[in-house]
Amino acid sequence: MQAALKEAVDRTLAQARIPGAAIAICIEGQPLLAVSVGHQDLHQTIPLPIDASFYIYSVTKSLIAAAVMNQVKSGRLSLDAPIQNYWPNFPVQTPITLRQILSHSGGLPDYGGLSAYQAAVKTTSGSPWSPEAFLEGASRRGLLFDPGQGWSYSNIGYLALKLLLEKVTGQSMQDYLDELFFTPLGLKHTFVAASLDDVTDLMPGYTSTFNDELEDMSQRYHPGWVSHGVVVSTAAELATIMHALIRGHILDLTLVEQMAQPVHSLGPHPPLQNVGCGLGLFVDTASPYGRVAGHNGGGPGYSIAAFHFSALAGRPTTIAAATNREGDNVGLAVAYALARVLAEA
């Protein structure tokens, strides 16, 4: 089985020209496999470590969403209240509910396609914009559509949620995620990165973001360029996080069900059959493996995925995959390559 799983990953990496990947699989809450495949360097001379650390990029959104739901449970926040109720000086005046921001249906713009952002990442990769600068850019552009009347992926929305959580809890992002996830789950290698000094042990990740040639971004790309904050983790600990979240070990299952309830349908996005966007989770509502819920992430150097399959070969299974070169959802492709092997077995 292990040989078949590694072969499936090898094949996917070769097709995408990715040096290596770390993968982890949990079945019914028990670790089945945590291995690395391939190499940590482009010359393919150094094996990629099993416990390699990566930015998990937008998988961080699932953790932020869970923290919001935890505050909903405590009564400090309400999903259907406008964010302006808690943040009177929010830079957008049109009322946007927390539910709409969580599901990317609030109309808030993004910054990834802005030429000014792309130029700044290249020229000042070690000095990110401030949260205020990100929000100011959103304010200048205005809403893309009336809240609740469309869908558009927005990192700015999750920056707003991160800042709101810090206002409501009086804690930093590291502290509230540590309290909710990291300490209860006994995680040793998972934390919120705040500076380049925090990530000296980050796995080399290869990108052409800065130049035409591939180069390692791990000590160049400041984590602050991920506006909503970014968590560092290993594949094994990321699988633990997503399993615990989906199975109700972090939040009450009633809250998890709300997170996994699609607010907007995005249609087929292979390998997902029919993607629904919930509250900080993407859900495949037409999967042959039961309900599939989780999140993927990507940015300079890495492609990440962590998904829970409710009935993969008849058993609840969580798969996490992290690659050390960016790619078009290649982390997701690796996770599904593993799922297919398990299903056929």
Image (cartoon, rainbow, N blue to C red):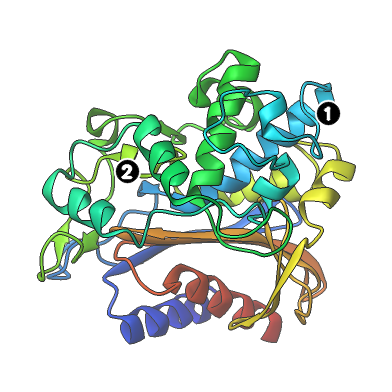
**Mark 1 or mark 2: whose residue is earlier in sequence:** 1
Q: Where in the figure is residue 209, as x and y percent of width and height?
A: 20, 62
Q: CA distance from mark 1 to mark 2?
A: 31 Å
Q: Residue at x 47, y 39 (%)?
A: 228
**Which residue sits furthest right?**
254
Three-letter residue code for mark 2: Trp
**Which residue sits furthest top?**
170
Q: Which residue is mark 2?
A: 225
Q: Residue at x 79, y 36 (%)?
A: 251
270 up-or-down from 281: above or below? below
Residue 230 placement, left or right of 82: left
**Residue 73: image tag:** 1
Residue 301 placement, left or right of 216: right
Residue 237 placement, left or right of 300: right
Which quadrant of the structure image shows residue 124? top left
- Quarter of the picture containing the C terminus is bottom right
Three-letter residue code for mark 1: Lys
- Please name whichever residue, 62 or 164, is drawn nearer the observer in this view of the structure: 164
- The local secondary structure at tag 1 comes to helix
- The local secondary structure at tag 2 comes to helix
Q: Where in the figure is residue 39, as x and y percent of width and height?
A: 25, 66
- Please name whichever residue, 262 or 249, is drawn nearer the observer in this view of the structure: 262
Can residue 25 be seen? no
2 up-or-down from 183: above or below? below
Which quadrant of the structure image shows residue 96? top right
161 up-or-down from 342: above or below? above
Quick one: label 1, few (<14), some, or many (20+) residues within 10 Å? some
The answer to whether mark 1 and mark 2 are in CB contact below 8 A is no
Q: Tag count in the figure?
A: 2
Q: Residue at x 44, y 82 (%)?
A: 7
